Amino acid sequence: MSKRLTQQQLDDMWAAWQEKQSVNHIVKKCKIHFQTAKKYRESERWDERFAVIHQKAIVKADAKIVTKRVSSIEMVDTAIDMWAAQAKGSMIVDCPHCGLQHEIPVPSMKAQFRDLAPFIVMKEQLGGGMPIEPRKHIVVLVEASGEYVDENAD
């Protein structure tokens, strides 16, 4: 005479499967027969259900990582912009009141190349790229601001 499992027992078996994807684990934890656990694993498609849940968890974790990286890259971009503004002596900002752009003076704190290099390397690494040679990129930034041209650049 076969005894049907209660919904609570089925839920406990599913929870045990999520802990460790092993029929033997379910048998030990839920104190049921091996064939019963195997039958419910197949009939309830626990492998497929778990794979879907696992994939959703991966996507969610990846989204959090990307969000943190984007935030970090934006902070590094701000630091680079501030460095360039110090080198130039001013920066252009969008005015929240009138909607126009205004150039404001930025006190020079003697911005030096060695101050910018770590930010460029950090931005490359956050973007998933390999570390780069910062000096080549620093020269491009400064040339764009019209302040400095490195005659020794490649």
Image (spheres, grey):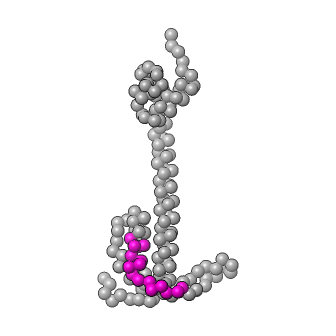
Quadrant assignment, res 135: bottom left
* Residue at (42, 34) in percent of width and height: 21
Which residue is most to the front?
Answer: 109
| Count of all numbered marks drawn on residues in the image | 0
Please state the horizontal and vertical placement of residue 59, each as a whole percent of the image: 48, 50
* Residue at (41, 22) in percent of width and height: 34
Please state the horizontal and vertical placement of residue 43, each as a whole percent of the image: 48, 27
Give 145 or 43, whichever is nearer the viewer: 145
Quadrant assignment, res 151: bottom left
* Residue at (39, 65) in percent of width and height: 125
Give 111 or 120, whichever is nearer the viewer: 111
Please state the extent of the stretch shown in magenta in the rendering: 106-121
- Above or below, 120 relative to 15: below
Q: Quick one: quadrant of the C terminus?
A: bottom left
* Residue at (31, 87) in percent of width and height: 152
- Above or below, 130 relative to 99: above
Please state the horizontal and vertical placement of residue 79, each as a whole percent of the image: 48, 75
- Residue 137 visible in the current orientation: no
